[in-house]
Amino acid sequence: MYTQALNIKDMAAAAEDSAFDARFQSRVDAEEKIEPNDWMPDAYRRTLVRQIAQHAHSEIVGMLPEGNWITRAPSLKRKAALLAKVQDEGGHGAYLYAAAETLGVSREDLVEQLLDGKQKYSSIFNYPTLSWADIGIIGWLVDGAAIMNQIPLCRCSYGPYARAMIRICKEESFHQRQGYEIMVTLCRDGTPEQKAMAQDALNRWWWPVLMMFGPSDKDSQHTDKSMRWKIKRFTNDDLRQKFIDATVPQGQYLGLTFPDPAMKHNDRTGHWEHGEIDWSEFKRVVAGDGPCNRQRMKQRRDANENGAWVREAALAFAQKRRARAEAAARIAAE
Amino acid sequence: MTEKNWPLWEVFIRSRTGLAHRHVGSVHAVDAEMALQNARDVYTRRGEGLSLWVVPSSAIVASDPADKDLMFEPTASKIYRHPTFYDVPDEVGHM
Amino acid sequence: MTETPLFRYTLRLADNALVLGHRLSEWVGRAPVLEEDLALGNLGLDLIGQARAFYVYAGEIEGRGRDEDALAYLRDAGEYCNVLLVEQPNGDFAATMMRQLFYSAFAHPFFEALQKSRDATLAAIAAKAVKEMAYHVRHSAEWVIRLGDGTDESHRRAQQAADDLWTYTGELFEADAVERALIEAGIAPDTAALRASFDNAINDVFDEATLQRPGSGFMQSGGRDGRHSEHLGFILTELQFLQRVYPGAKW
């Protein structure tokens, strides 16, 4: 890690110095980007590592529910698009781990913390994909919600994170459209069975998707500080509202019914109001008791363990080759 | 088992636009050949580049942010290096 | 109506690409390292793209209105005519890379030759595919070298993969009546002439990988005429399930 040496020196020298803190905050306030070698408060670094790692883990675990359907995609066009999309998610995970690594942590350590359950990933991926319509729903709603969250992150105060997000948002733009196109095909051009498949998928995913924006502002622990540091720019509730307002007309176009009897348009505010979110379900799934938590982690753990001999072999080969090159150079020099 | 980590490489891409190689991120790889392939697979899935560089992250030497003033401030006052410092009569036209 | 040799031949090329692409897509989310997950995805996407181009063309040649999906999703195993190599299970990472090396070390010189086909469509598809297969050779060769000359365990696994899969390499170079008619017409390359190029590529990689090249031994065959291993049926079961359960639906 090319940033580590400087980081350690700076942190030791400046740990107690609140002048640094004030100077840091004024840089953030002036919309200056904070870069890896710059001094930053320890808590800012910790918050970023936690958030970027969680974001990266979400991309990687997020490959699984959709990856499920690559071999069963119903046409070659859909198969190619889905494979490309799931692969993109792996790519986004890679960009994000790379951004986290500029903060002085290693990807391997972060992955270990994921597998040990010490770091989280987005709970939405603990729900199962039961039909092809779920692939449409994930693109339309899950990616749609993710984009709402991610666009403001392109202006995040931490340079490497912001730059990774710009790249990710650019690539993500096809994901949501891919999903919505599947929904249109099922709902408007499809058979009654296909439409029912779509409605069933919406019924299962709608509430978990709303939970993706995190707890309501009055219960969120991280919002204040993250806003001050410009890691976060909108509150959970603001983003959730924005998402609902954008999504409801799209669902109406499909002729689908949102599974929320309390949902209604407020003509005065111009917003769609929604019913009460069941936060006990959210807490239960985050705590590990969603339908697929164990299954997802097992698949990640298996991939990691089954690949250990491959990673070792590549390292051993590189070492041998280096040793051979050095020996050859010694002989040449003699 | 404590597994040894794969080294980190910084990735630079020269895009189609003819600009210089630009830093895009990093990959893990055990050696240069695989670092190039990994960079290709991770960072050029949409025809982003015509040329790739990979550099061991440990080989990059960075300036110290604490030196920012002494390194970069002194040039700010040398306005005579910029074309707008000099007046050219309007009649002469663009120069 | 009897099918033409050109239809049969194009379908073989399509089936090879689809079945191998499908196998690679099974790896998603399971690779030994994140970068490799992306690499396997890229290899799979190349092959699925090739399959689509060949299916579209096969449908045109046939002239019965079958599109790429009708050909991919509505034929049973006996009508699939891919070589046996590509349907072999992924196994461990060594088996997958070895299968990829064997296939691409054949497919690369094959597409190079097919670029000169007198059939303009096949030549055009080949011109795109040849670059993709060149990368597949490079990527799989680098991995086979690292696994062969890595640790004792990786060496053992790589050698096992080579020994298990070698028996499926003979079929790549077989020419039956279908193919001979097209070779004479200047449409298909003579695969016997590609053997030396394949052998050289494999020998070079195996030398560097410190692996033993398996002896010539018995060569399995039959896939191109619809006689498959047990594995293909399971692939098609997954691949075709939605099209079969909802006949006629659009997706």
Image (cartoon, coloured by chain):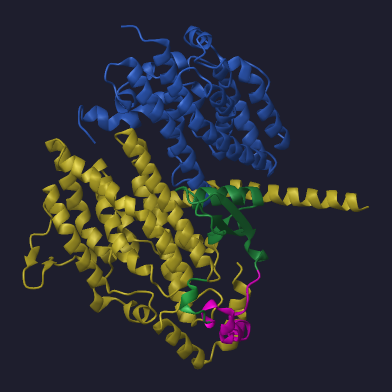
Chain colours: A yellow, B green, C blue
**B31 and B70: which is toward the camera:** B70
Quadrant of the drawing holding the N terminus of chain C: top left
Magenta-colored segment: predominant secondary structure: helix
Regarding residue B7, the answer to whether it shows in the image is no
**A289 and C120: which is toward the camera:** C120
Give left or right: position of A136 versus B45.
left
Residue A117 position, x and y percent, is 43, 63
**C174 and C85: which is toward the camera:** C174
Give left or right: position of B76 versus A116.
right
User: Is-magenta flag for residue C228?
Assistant: no
Residue at 34% from the left image edge and 77% from the top image edge: A222
Q: How many marks?
A: 0
Residue at 61% from the left image edge and 15% from the top image edge: C192
User: Is-magenta flag for residue B63?
Assistant: yes
Residue at 55% from the left image edge and 52% from the top image edge: B39
Q: Is A7 placed above or below C131 here?
A: below
Residue C38 position, x and y percent, is 48, 47
Give the residues in magenta. Answer: B61-86
Give left or right: position of C162 versus A41.
right
